[in-house]
Amino acid sequence: MQPKTFIFIGRSGCGKGTQAKILREYIEKMDNEKRKIMYLETGPRFREFIKLPGYTNKLASYITDTGGRQPDFLAVWNWAHVLIEEMTGEEHLIVDGMPRSYEEALVFDSAISFYNRAKPIVIHIDVSREWSKKHLFTRSKIEGRKDDSSLEQIERRLNWFDTDVLPALKYFEKAPGYNFVHVNGEQTIDQVTQAITKGLNW
């Protein structure tokens, strides 16, 4: 199996992380060459970042506390230095939860071109706003997520998808160098997995 690139995009709470991990496990079983899989999950990485005592960390933590969106330069830094330090060119790449803006999508596209990643696959897990709100609120009660601690913060995050993430999604949907897979996320986990598998023609 040649090195492949997968990008999971969808509203918060749509199950991106779950499906990304299922795909990772599938590739580990099916790749006879046993290539390394770089799993780039930006959310947990950033939540650890804002716990640190530095000046930038404190400013970023304040943005999270007040329900704002982190600036693009921090979002890019969050994943770009990982690619620079760890990319060998021989691994599969699974990206979970980014890019989150049109500008970030352009920078990520430049990284894809720089690393000569052939035909990245964008997997859009599509759920409604109300479906996402319900799952985010439930998750916040279970996991104690700081960025989902109130309905007001959840509403702000859902607004970002329409104003910021959706333009990035549309960019990849029209980009000639990408394969785009759209699936209905308002199904069981197994059904979503089957829909993704069908979209990938596996």
Image (cartoon, rainbow, N blue to C red):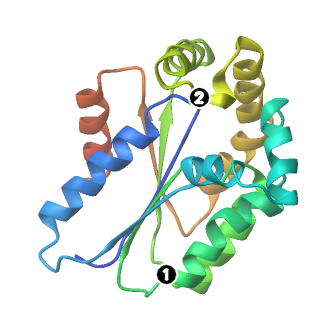
- Residue closest to the eye, 62 or 34: 62
**Residue drawn at the location 25% of the way across and 77% of the way down:** 35
- Relative to residue 19, is residue 1 depicted above or below? below
Q: Element type at marker 1?
A: helix
In this view, the residue in front, 127 or 83, is: 83
| Quarter the N terminus occupies | bottom left
Q: Which residue is mark 1?
A: 86
Residue 167 or 138: which is nearer the viewer?
138
Task: Give the amino acid type for the residue marked by disc 2 in the picture.
Answer: Arg
Figure check: 147 above or below 59: above
Residue visible at 80% across and 32% down?
65
Q: Residue at x 11, y 75 (%)?
A: 32
Q: Residue at x 13, y 61 (%)?
A: 29
Residue 4 location (% of width, % of height)? 36, 70
Task: Find numbered disc 2 in the image and state the secondary structure of the residue it sits on.
Answer: loop
Residue 23 badge: none
Question: Where 172 falls versus 151 (above or below)?
Answer: below
Asked if residue 149 lies left or right of residue 122, the reply is right
Measure how far apart labels 1 and 2 are at the Cα level: 28 Å
Amino acid carrying mark 1 in the image = Glu
* Horizontal and vertical percent position of residue 198: 26, 44
